[in-house]
């Protein structure tokens, strides 16, 4: 192995189903980079030691998936704003001084997807309506506030979980139970589904978009099916829509750039490759 051969990996537990090796493998090949992106399953009992002694892994950096994002963040010497705010890191790298850096790129993935597929979407950043209050919702709230949305409403089955996000992010965010959805739709400039509802094998997302302004943008983080019922319904009434696959792909961009020195693009061939692997039709 030469000095220039760099290794990165998806780390977590389990990692066997992760698409990250396919994404990074595509970019390594496209750019002719001598490097490798693999899978490292880190057992929960080993996680603290693994991330605290990350240099011993031989990796220049890594992605982190559930359930280790919080453990990884706690082990970092430095965190970016998103990782610090969320207390969770999904991208790690060792810098020139040997320090372990952590970032949370889920929010950047969300932004990168909309920037690419709906240019100008945040020009009049107004009122956003976020369905769900899990880890993805938290990252998306961070992302929307970073683009100066004036109000971010979070609607969740369990209102207390939405309230926890509001407690973290402050005065521009508002927590609601599901019953408030109808009224909130009427003022939304952006509607985002971050719940698993509508995903293949999960219950449908039952929502009536009648009150949603026609100018509102609608996006879903579910990408299997690629065009969810929510997106279908929105497109049929004339709303602009963006599917969720790009968030998965764009969140990988900053890590690849750190580890391998090239900022990669999310192109049509990459989308097609991942869709084929997911068995999802475009
Ligand atoms: P992630 O961290 O990936 O975002 P998660 O923490 O499992 O995933 O969050 C899933 C979201 O989908 C939550 O907001 C969840 O609502 P609760 O907080 O009330 O559990 C929401 N969700 C999942 N199944 C649901 C259902 N059948 N009806 C309404 N909301 C649902």
Image: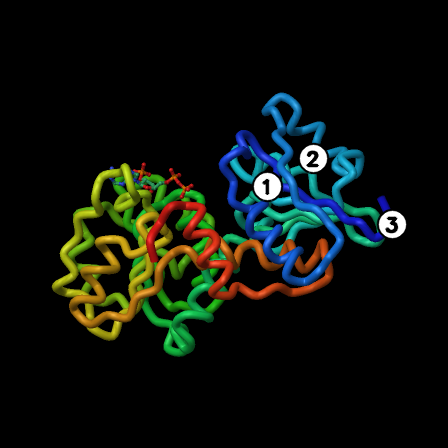
| Disc 3: which residue | 3
Residue 129 lies, in percent from the top left, at 30, 59
Between the residue at mark 3 and the residue at mark 2, the CA separation in whole angstroms equals: 23 Å
Mark 1 neighbour density, 10 Å: few (under 14) some (14–19) many (20 or more): many
Give the percent coordinates (x, y) of residue 114. Answer: 42, 67
Q: Earlier in the sequence, mark 3 or mark 2?
A: 3
Element at label 1? strand
Ligand 1 quadrant in view: top left
201 on left or right of 117: left
Sequence-earlier tag: 1 or 2? 2
Tell me if residue 154 can be seen.
Answer: no
Vertical relation: 241 (above or below) 5: below
Sooner in the amino-acid sequence: mark 1 or mark 3: 3
The residues bearing labels 1 and 3 have C-alpha atoms spaced at a distance of 24 Å
Kindly report the distance in space between the C-alpha atoms of the residues bearing marks 1 and 2: 10 Å
Q: Which residue corresponds to the image point at 64% horizontal and 28% vertical from the top-left?
A: 47
Based on the displayed image, in which of its 4 quarters is residue 282 positioned? bottom left
The N terminus lies in which quarter of the figure?
Answer: top right
Residue that appears at 69% across and 64% down: 262
How many marks on residues? 3
Residue at position x 37%, y 77% in the image: 124
Q: Nearer the viewer, mark 3 or mark 2?
A: 3
| Element type where label 3 sits in the image | loop
Q: Which residue is mark 2?
A: 51
Q: Can you identify the residue that label 1 sits on? A: 64
Question: Contact, CB < 8 Å: mark 1 with mark 2?
Answer: yes
Q: Residue furthest right?
A: 3
Q: Is residue 41 left or right of residue 95?
A: left
Does any atom of ligand 1 lie closer than 8 Å to the CB of label 2? no
Tell whether 119 sits left or right of 3: left
């Amino acid at each position: 192995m030469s000095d220039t051969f760099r290794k990165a990996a998806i780390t977590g537990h389990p990692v066997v189903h992760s698409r990250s090796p396919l994404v990074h493998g595509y970019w390594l090949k496209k750019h002719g980079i001598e490097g490798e992106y693999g899978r490292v399953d880190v057992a929960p009992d080993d996680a603290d030691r693994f991330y605290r002694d990350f240099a011993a892994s031989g990796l220049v950096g890594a992605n982190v998936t559930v359930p280790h994002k919080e453990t990884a963040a706690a082990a970092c010497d430095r965190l970016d704003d998103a990782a610090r705010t969320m207390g969770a890191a999904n991208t790690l790298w060792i810098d020139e001084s040997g320090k372990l850096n952590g970032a949370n790129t889920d929010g950047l993935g969300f932004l990168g997807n909309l920037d690419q597929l709906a240019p100008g979407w945040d020009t009049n950043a107004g009122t956003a309506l976020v369905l769900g209050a899990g880890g993805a919702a938290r990252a998306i709230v961070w992302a929307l506030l970073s683009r100066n949305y004036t109000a971010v409403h979070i609607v969740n089955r369990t209102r207390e979980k939405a309230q926890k996000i509001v407690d973290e992010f402050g005065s521009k965010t508002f927590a609601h139970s599901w019953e408030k959805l109808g009224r909130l739709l009427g003022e939304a400039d952006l509607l985002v589904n971050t719940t698993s509802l509508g995903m293949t094998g999960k219950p449908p997302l039952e929502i009536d978009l009648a009150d949603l302004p026609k100018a509102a943008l609608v996006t879903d983080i579910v990408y299997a099916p690629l065009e969810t019922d929510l997106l279908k319904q929105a497109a049929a009434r004339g709303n602009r829509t963006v599917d969720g696959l790009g968030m998965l792909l764009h969140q990988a961009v900053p890590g690849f750039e750190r580890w391998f020195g090239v900022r990669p693009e999310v192109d049509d061939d990459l989308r097609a490759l991942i869709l084929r692997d997911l068995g999802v039709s475009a």
